[in-house]
Image (cartoon, rainbow, N blue to C red):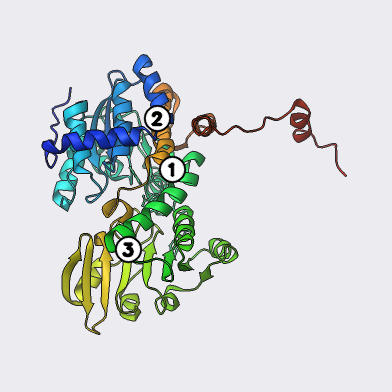
């Protein structure tokens, strides 16, 4: 037992959180199957897990699954604005899980929780954005004691891990859950696509039809956001720095242009690049009056909010998660969710149906690390293909979707080189 104690907003919110966790669980059949097996097999018996994830009702189902497998879990937020306080309360009250996360917490509180998660002396880490891994690597002598491995949920986190690996500084094996096909094909694309538009709409109640939406970045998330904005009737402009991705966006039917051109036309902006200062001073100055500006990339660096604050002659809160910045040219810019991920700050994040696959990967990748850690190197690992495929198979089954099987003759044909024209 570690001495870490929960730190949440209000334990009285637990009954509402409990129902929301159950509601999400109803759409997570793959994770449910894993939980039932873990209950019997206890793969994490005697192990402590420090998880730094968005504290949502979907994450709650993952934490409950790990606990069912015998883990002693400490859960902290991976973003100051994404915590669902009712969920945090229920996890503490109804599931006996340690949670240190409060929606809207400041930088100091956020990091005090990250360090508390490390005082949990974990055997396994589970990150969304690599903040825990980064803290461990800054003071390894203090925090590496028990660690046998970890997992990482998102693109930006995997980039940070690969940077550590490239510099030969990575101290333990970590599975890049993001890179599983059953993760980024679905979570990043359909999850971010839907929940980002959901966040923009909940914050503003703006009509998307007929508006011009700029999507910065046409990766897995950008494709989803552009697709859903188009589906709601927006004129979509994509900005990119990669010629291949830009070409794909052109052939998918979007206008592609540099941001300095896009700002002349856009009503709504969504950045999803994983990069910094994608929207900056020169862009703010050229934007139309009442532009709506949001980000769905992992960190709040994509929009230069500090610069926007400096440029503004007046700032006022307009609605929940909408801040109005009036510039010296009298144009107004509406910044959503402080420039943090709009889908988790102003809405509820991805639906459970898609998080089911992401978190099935988290659960099974963690089990894989426990089974194989003695033979693993200090490297970033992919989720084994058999796990990835099995998750897809069970997900299809849960959706009552059947598929064809290869005949012996087809198998032979696909393995042969002799037969041609
Ligand atoms: P990706 O690598 O597939 O795509 C990123 C794209 O942005 C690339 O095509 C890249 O060329 C482009 N890009 C980089 N710099 C740019 C710039 N200055 N201007 C325009 N385009 C630029 O990554 P992804 O999986 O789409 O993830 C994007 C971000 O979203 C990451 O930070 C990731 O962690 C985050 N993410 C957020 C959620 C969420 O719930 N909001 C979910 C999954 C991933
Ligand atoms: N990332 C995006 N959506 C999420 C959700 N609903 N729960 C946890 N992490 C997420």
Residue 179, placed above or below residue 149: below
- Contact between marks 1 and 3 (CB within 8 A): the answer is no
User: In the rendered image, which residue does mark 3 sit on?
Assistant: 294
Ligand 1 within 8 angstroms of badge 1 C-beta: yes
Residue 148 can be seen in this image: yes
Q: CA distance from mark 1 to mark 2?
A: 17 Å
Residue drawn at point x = 54 percent, y = 29 percent: 386
CB of mark 3 within 8 Å of CB of mark 2?
no
Q: Earlier in the sequence, mark 1 or mark 3?
A: 1
In the depicted view, which residue is nearer to us: 113 or 98?
A: 98
Q: Quadrant of residue 54?
A: top left
Which of labels 1 and 3 is toward the front? Answer: 3
Left or right: where 36 falls relative to 312: right
Per the image, the residue denoted by label 1 is 178
Pointer 2 residue: 31
Q: Residue at the location (29% across, 38% down)?
A: 57
Mark 3 Cα-neighbour bin, 10 Å: few <14, some 14–19, many ≥20: many
The mark nearer the N terminus, 3 or 2, is 2
Question: Residue 348 at x, y = what percent?
Answer: 30, 48
Dot 3 lies on which element? strand
**Nearer to us in this view, 268 or 411:** 268
């Amino acid at each position: 037992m570690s001495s870490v104690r929960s730190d949440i907003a209000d334990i009285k919110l637990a009954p509402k959180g409990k129902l929301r966790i159950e509601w999400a669980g109803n759409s997570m059949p793959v994770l449910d199957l894993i939980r039932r097996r873990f209950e019997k097999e206890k793969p994490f018996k005697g192990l402590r897990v420090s998880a730094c994830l968005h504290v949502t009702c979907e994450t709650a189902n993952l934490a409950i699954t790990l606990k069912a497998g015998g883990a002693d879990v400490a859960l902290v937020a991976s973003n100051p604005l994404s915590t669902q306080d009712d969920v945090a309360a229920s996890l503490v009250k109804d599931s006996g899980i340690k949670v240190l996360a409060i929606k809207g917490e400041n930088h100091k509180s956020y990091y005090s929780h990250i360090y508390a998660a490390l005082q949990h002396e974990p055997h396994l880490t589970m990150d969304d954005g690599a903040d825990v891994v980064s803290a461990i690597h800054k003071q390894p002598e203090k925090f590496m004691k028990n660690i046998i491995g970890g997992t990482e949920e998102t693109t930006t986190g995997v980039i940070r891990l690969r940077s550590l690996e490239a510099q030969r500084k990575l101290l333990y094996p970590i599975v890049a859950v993001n890179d599983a096909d059953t993760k980024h094909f679905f979570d990043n694309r359909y999850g971010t696509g839907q929940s980002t538009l959901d966040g923009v709409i909940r914050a503003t109640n703006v009509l998307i039809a007929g508006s011009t939406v700029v999507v910065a970045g046409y990766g897995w998330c950008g494709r989803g956001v552009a697709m859903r904005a188009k589906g709601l009737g927006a004129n979509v402009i994509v900005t990119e720095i990669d010629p291949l991705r830009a070409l794909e966006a052109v052939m998918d039917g979007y206008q592609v242009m540099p941001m300095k051109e896009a700002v002349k036309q856009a009503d709504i902006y969504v950045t999803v690049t994983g990069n910094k200062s994608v929207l900056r001073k020169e862009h703010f100055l050229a934007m139309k009056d009442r532009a709506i500006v949001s980000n769905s990339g992992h960190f709040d660096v994509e929009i230069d909010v500090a610069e926007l604050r400096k440029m503004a002659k007046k700032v006022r809160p307009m609605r929940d998660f909408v801040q109005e910045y009036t510039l010296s040219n009298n144009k107004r810019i509406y910044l959503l969710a402080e420039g943090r991920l709009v889908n988790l700050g102003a809405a509820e994040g991805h639906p459970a149906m898609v998080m089911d696959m992401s978190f099935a990967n988290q659960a099974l990748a963690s089990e894989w690390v426990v089974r194989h850690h003695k033979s693993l190197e200090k490297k970033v690992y992919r989720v084994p293909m058999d796990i990835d495929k099995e998750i897809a198979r069970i997900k299809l089954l849960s959706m009552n979707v059947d598929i064809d099987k290869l005949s012996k003759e087809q198998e032979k044909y696909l393995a042969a080189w002799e037969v041609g024209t």
